[in-house]
Amino acid sequence: MSTLWLIILFPILTGITTLFTKSHKIRKILLLICSVVHMALTVFICQGSITPATESWFTTDALTKIFLSITSLLYFGASLYALTYLKPDEDGDQPSALLDLSFLRNKNAVFMGCMHFFLAAMTLSIVSAHFGLQWIGVEATTLASTPLIYHHRNKKSLEAAWKYLIICSVGIALALMGIFFLAMAVPAQVEFFTPRGLSKFAGYLRTDWLQVAFIFVLVGYGTKVGFAPMHTWLPDAHSEAPSPASALLSGALLNCALLAILRVYQVCAEIPAVQTLASELFVLFGLVSMAISGIFIMHQADYKRMLAYSSVEHMGVMAFGFGLGKVAVAAALFHAICHSLIKSSLFMLAGNILSAYQTKKVEKIHGLLRTMPVTSVLWLAGFLAITGTPPFGTFMTEFSILKTAVESRNYLFGALYLLFLVLVFVGMLTIFSTMALGKKMTVNSEGQPIDYKELNLRKDGTIYEHPLQYITPIIFLAAALYLGCNIPEPILQTINEASAILGGKAL
Amino acid sequence: MNSIATLLALSCLFLLGSSRLMLAINMIAFQGFLIGILPLVSGHGFSFEVIILAATGIIMKSIALPQMLKKALEKSGTKREVEPYISFGASILSGIILLFISGWIASRLTQDETIVSSSLIAGFFLLFTGLFTIITRKKALTQALGFLVLENGVYTAGLSLGSEFSFMVELGILLDVFVGIFLMGIMLFHIDKEFDHIDTDRFDALSDLELLNGNILNLDQDTDEEEGAE
Amino acid sequence: MDFFLSAIVAIFVGGIIALLTGKWRGVSNFFGAFSCFLGTIFALKPIYEVLIENKTLEAITFALPICSASVSLDKISAFFALPILILGFVSAYFAAVTVNPRNEQHPGAYWFFYNLLIAGMLSLVASSNAVLFIMAWEIMSVAAYFLIAHRDEINTARNAAWQFLVASHIGTTGIFFLFAILISAAGGYQFESFYSAALPEGSAAVIFFLALFGFGVKVGFFPLHIWMPDSYTFADSHVSAVLSGAMSKMGFYGLIRVLTFLPVHAETWGWVLLFGGLITGVYALIIGLVKLDLKKVISYSSMENAGIILMAIGTGILANHWNQSLIAFAAFSGALLHIFNHALSKGLLFLCAGSVYFATGTRRQEQMGGIGKAMPVTATAFGIGAAAISGLPPFNNFVSEFLIFMSGLKAASLSTPKSLLLASAILLGLGLIGGLAAAMFARSFGLVFLGSPRTNKRLNTKNIKTDVNFALIILSVAIVAASICAPLLISPFAGVVSEIVKPLGITYDPAHLATISAPVKTISQFSLAIILITLIVVFIKSKYLDKGQRTDAPTWDCGFLKGTARIQYTSSSFSEPANEVFTSVNRLHIRGEKIKDLFPAKSSFHTETVDSAEKHLFIPTFSIINKFLIMFRGFQHGKLHLYIFYIAVTLLALLIWKVVY
Amino acid sequence: MNASSIIFIFVSLLAGPILPGLINKTKALFGGRQGPRVLQLYYDIFKLARKTPTYSETASALTRIAPVVIALSSITALTLVPSFFNDSVIHFTGDIILMAYLLGLGRFFMVTAALDRGSAFEGMGASREVLYSALAEPSFFAGLLIMIYETNSLELSEIFSKLSLNFWQENPAILFLILCSWFVILLVENARIPIDDPNTHLELTMIHEVMILDYSAKDLALIEYASALKLWIYSALIVGMLINGEIITNMALQIAIFTLGMAIVAFVIGTIESITARIKLVFIPKFIVGSGALAIIALILKVAGN
């Protein structure tokens, strides 16, 4: 039993306690404590002071460090944000016939509890080296996050949650199939069913089974990552989930699933035949995802769905990068960091707008610059960041991915990549400018004049924004900006190690 | 071994053919039982862990889950699957086609193996049947069932490939599946409560069919008319 | 170099201070404008050193995430920094005395983006590294976007900003791609490494045309110009001055910079640039000649000048290809000189338009007239600017156009068919362009400032801002100076030219400088003479000769007494003959109802012309793209079954595609 | 700068206003009338110069400045014209461009000044003037191109001196075409029939005259003089183009031939004015563009020639 269990078990414990606490305040405190402790443990892991006893179950290699720190950071931000986002509500929902447990009455209790479980599941899927264990983790994230999506308990959220549950379960079942095939591919003498364990016996792995395994895993986990055309659950879930949850979903969860694919890819990278197949598939899915997301971001009527599709696009960008190999791998990993920071803050800002205007329709909102100064400025900054405008980090990564594409003479792919990026840019620009610019809004979604009192309006005509609502986005966006200008040495080293693991070059 | 595989296949065909949901659930329970005993007969010997796994598998898949689903069924008051996207006769036909496909794929995959394990074919067939059910049936319940079949398929294939993990992992996998179906069950209640039907084909409130108003690429504008400002 | 960097930093920091002190408008304005002034002062020293003293400043290197970038200032950069600094400073002054921010918003953001734009452009010319270049380019575009969108409560302004950013982003992809090719060929990000890059076969042409596309959007190369008129029109005037005077020049900078990376210039490129430029110029004038909006007219004129400059560059490339170093030299120096001169005069014109706007509250020429009497300084400045931009002696643009003409004449004297084609393109083309430009600006100048007011309510003398006159005077003086001291300007610019062609392994004979500056000397003497004599004679005439029994009378109106101001010629009627001639390009859209029966009811008549490139090329294409995109939206229909179906199909397809076969 | 060029300047400045007189005489001859004196324009100019100008009330300072600039532009342009078959006073590479643009400067001021009075008619003339001259510009340069192409020299005087007669003899077609196009330009720029009728009385049909409706006295004198000089310059160009100075060395002879040539040009203009009616305004652009087409055909012929 290594100390690593702690980082998984602690959230579970706090989660259970949360479920059974009545007071909203204590739950908030628990949430904060959990996230802080998790961060502390993460720091230890990244320092290398916590390492797995045996390499049979867990690993703390560079990949884990990157994704774990992203998750932990995002979770902290999300929990900070959740403090203001969740208004304490007295009435839970009606008791369900099967499980008449008291905590189910309280939406917030369930929500916060599941947040903890969600964290635990994600952490498990990140730190686990054993493929089976990792699969359990990923499946667990689905189970833990379904109640988060269903938090609002209305028809739409129910529909979203159901779709999410079915689609992701199916996908992950396929991934399990893939893992069985992977097990089929390994010779008997392999002691650890982990990436490193298999890499040791690269020579003895069986190509054909490995290929099948990779296809199954890619399609299966790809469903969870949101590669088109398996992405269909993503916009529904992200738009219906409460904003802290959507921030975590697109910022952290997708990365976990991506990591699960990368682990298998790590094995495939050892064998040229499979490696080429894997790269082809990565490029294929990357471009398709970017195309689909571009098409749906253009004319998108719902700004949270727009953000969701943008996640699809960025997952596509990363996949494209992994497929290209070389420097692009490092770039893609770096892109994952930047994307998580930016996208989560965008979701939080979307939450602010939603809670102020009570509508997700783009055309119902304009003149934000005049009503929500801080949020709207960050909103525009986030737009620039997510579309890869310098000096944000995303620019560097997207450009070096393009560079790699051109270097390896994939002119066509490079051109398509740029084309889709432009498509996304135009669509997003339209949406963001429609919302931020223009005259101050006077009518609400129903067309009645807005009662700015209920939006607790200030004297100068701006809506009151609680500091906790925008402190996290400010920090995250600032971080993304800073990463664009200079990557701190330790982060750079970790990224380079990770890309070396995946057979890529250093950034 | 082979007999179990055949039984599994038959149960699938039954599942495809039958419109009555209760029967379908019973079929699933039967499948659960078959898959439960599969590791025992697959000749890996009778270790303690194997027995435990088989027991939990049987309890979960052929007793607990079917019971819950039956509850849900009774509560929703629906008896049978009404017009699926593909009629039952056609479903059976396509089931047979799927059987051929899975046989083909399995043989192609294992062409350099000594034997084409029948349970691998069964696994593929279950998997495809599960997918097929989810795709063609309308009731949310049936989709849950389909998912269960799919899971069974994966499990069977896993067994047939003889790739067994350590005890803990296997247990974890089982647990996950269980919780998954369990959640689906709970949500079935909620769906029933919210929509007072469990037809997922009416689940299309969330779509991207509506466009953002106004011409996105608005190039045409009578600029001479409107005054800009300094 | 430190000075140049500190200039950039000063301007940027000034913008931030202005942003922070935005609550107090005076303070914010002061910091915003003063930092621009300070930056100009700082930056002039290194520019002087590079251009005049031929020093080479050591580059400053710093680290970026994916490479280490360095900034340096060679002659080309220094030259292109000039318009930025001049206009940046003058427009900053103009802004400081006029910026009247929306009441909801403090001017801080405004200054922040203004200074960001200037700083971005300065770092663009200074950057000698691909990544840094693109970063500066994007920052510049974004800052410009926010400046144009400053009046976002107006729909058209929002649309203009939208068009601008979309166009510039689409263009930027070309730049991304060409730099990606260069980087992968050179294996480095620094510009130095590009010179020795081993380009793969045929990629030089790809790079050139990508550059033409990417930078052509910025300079307004036909038909990539459609964003241009609106953006320049709906931005505030001093912003338009900077956009058109400095930012569009960055396009030329990029084009020239990329040309230096390419070892050999194919002949086709020259022809493309030449005739592309010709079409651009003529088209711009045909459309601009019938536009009713003052700032639109000026915007189209900057497109026209872009055409002239492109023609000159094309000539240079062709001449280099034919080893006619003198022609190439004349053409390139003409191009550079024209870039400089155009920046001055275009800035002046836009600022004049701005100060007219304050007085009248409109940009529509139909509603102006007789403003000159109320605003003599503005009128004079506009007159000078108009005469200059239509390339008339004694003003500076004539000198640069003359150099281009000269390269054409020299080409004619080569007496080969190709050279004759080149020569006729330049002589005939420039001749036509010059004539039409004169027509266009005579029209605008006459109808806005001369005659009598067409509507009595428009001009409000209280709104006249006299303190902007300083800015106008500076630029007018600069124009006159530039035309009289043209010979002095040529020698430093010649250095820039030789820097441009150095990578081609071409070195120009120093004698060429003498050859082309000899006529320029004579011309500048002419200019001086004309200006002086005119002043003297006018002085004498008005002082002594016009004395005596003067009986001033109303304008002769053919015996029709009491003619009102309404009978004056309007801008649309002025451009009517031209419209008749070019009607195939700019079809007139007439709205309004016919006058019927004996006692007609009140009827209206309205004519307008749209940019046919926009109407017949872009709107159709974009709507087709729209339809195509919308086709796919059924994909996300909300049916769970089919979502699962996608997954199944994907899986099967991959299995069958990859494994089973 | 040699003696002949100085003389030429003085001669031109003095003799400029004769040409319109000659033209009118010719027209009178054709009309079988006595007609005004040849020196009539001198009398007019002197008469006007003695008077005090009357300005429109709407006129601004531009109205007062414009005549000076217009006159100045013509005079400065004159210094670039080859004196009888020899060098011009000031000659340098591409001086012809400067000449063309100097005349353009005059036109610019003429037009803007016309708009200055806010008249109902003057704008009319202005709008036509700018368009027609803009269209005329290319055909002028096209004609020029051929000569440069032939002579390989970029100075006007040099071009003219190098244009040997036998070049014209060799290809008369080119000669004819260029002559036609340049003559049309002369007519356009100097507002002669069939483009414009200098002594029509209907403002609606005027081009040049309508722009100076509101000028009087000294200003009008300056403008009349300037336009006379302009006519002189264009005629001088045509004469210089046709007759080669190299073969005639004796200066007196040169002057004689030059004067004769100018007289002939004036006579031809007069003839054209008497035998043709002015064409419809709508057709004028086509007319001008057609003349440009002639020049371009000549160009093509030339290229095809070698």
Image (cartoon, helix red, strand yellow):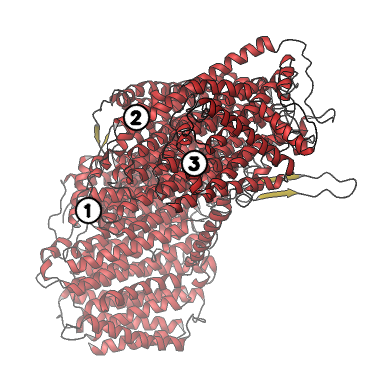
Q: Is residue C273 left or right of residue A507?
A: right
Q: Are marks 2 and 1 on the same chain?
A: no
Looking at numbered disc 3 in the image, what kind of residue is underneath it?
Leu
Which quarter of the figure is the N terminus of chain C placed in?
top left
Q: Secondary structure under badge 2?
A: helix
Q: Is residue C565 left or right of residue C580?
A: right
> C508 or C474, which is in the foreground?
C508
Of the two numbered discs 2 and 1 in the rendering, the one whose residue sits closer to the viewer: 2
Q: Are marks 1 and 3 on the same chain?
A: no
Q: Is residue C375 left or right of residue D201?
A: left
Q: Secondary structure under badge 3?
A: helix
Of the two numbered discs 2 and 3 in the rendering, the one whose residue sits closer to the viewer: 3
Residue at label 2? C513
Looking at numbered disc 1 in the image, what kind of residue is underneath it?
Leu
**Residue A45 position (above or below residue A1):** above
Question: Which of the 4 image quarters holds residue C191?
Answer: top left
